[in-house]
Amino acid sequence: MRTANKLDIVKADAASGENLDEFIKLTEEYFRENWPENLRGHSDWRAHYRKWLTTRWKEGGRRLWIIKSGGKPAGLVNFYSSGPQGERVGHISEFYVKADFRRRGIGREMFLLVRAELEKDGCRIIKSEVQPDEPGRMAFWEELGFAVVKVQMALNLAADEEE
């Protein structure tokens, strides 16, 4: 699929493996840039993530997109829909635009394509998780019409062990 900004959407398929290695490699780059701690603890993170994606894929409705601009990987989106008809919710699990491609409208266009797909699924709400210490990401989603609807809290049990 080609877009007005000359973006190409390359679909990865966790069942057949088509384009999956490229999607996983790009996801690893995304994690390394944003949450390197999530890559630790796995002797082979890519194999671990492949297994996770395959499991999620089997649940149905998941889409894995590699976004290309000028033939080069510019970003990725991992999203799905859930819930009964009339109450379906779209979930954006991962949304990444590589640093060299930011501030060009690519993220906005990526979202509009995702939104159109989720609307076709009958979704009435779209959710995307953002950490409160990521003001740039918060602003991006707010500019697209998203609003903060809840704050998720966590207790780090490992912190007690470190003392």
Image: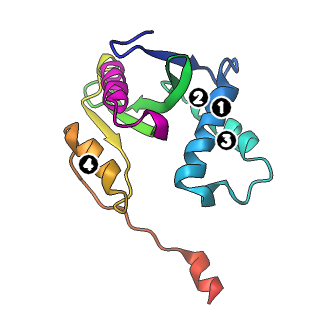
The residue singled out by tag 1 in the image is 54
Q: Residue furthest top?
A: 1
Q: What colouring does the structure picture have?
A: rainbow
- What amino acid type is highlighted by mark number 4? Ala
Q: Which residue is mark 4?
A: 139
- Residue at 58% over, 28% down: 57
Label 1 crowd (10 A; few <14 / some 14-19 / many >=20): some
Q: CA distance from mark 4 to mark 2?
A: 30 Å
Q: Name the residue rendered at 30%, 61% in the picture.
A: 151
Q: Amino acid at mark 2?
A: Trp
Name the residue rendered at 44%, 69% in the picture.
154
Sooner in the amino-acid sequence: mark 3 or mark 2: 3
Of badges 4 and 1, nearer the viewer stands: 4
The residue tagged 2 is 57
Q: Position of residue 142 (x, y in %)?
A: 22, 45
Residue 95: which numbered mark, if any? none
Instruction: Compute the Cα span from label 3 to label 1.
Output: 8 Å
* Above/below status of 163 relative to 84: below
> Crowding near pointer 3: few (<14 within 10 Å), some, many (20+)?
some
* Left or right, residue 83 beside residue 23: left
Dominant SS of magenta comes to: helix
Q: In terms of sequence position, does the residue under pointer 4 or pointer 1 come before the other?
A: 1
Q: Does residue 65 appear to the left or right of 107 in the view shown?
A: right
Is residue 98 on the magenta stretch?
yes
Mark 3 and mark 4: Cα distance apart in space: 28 Å
Mark 2 vs 1: CB contact within 8 A:
yes
Q: Which residues are magenta?
A: 97-118
Query: Which x, y percent locates residue 27?
Result: 59, 39
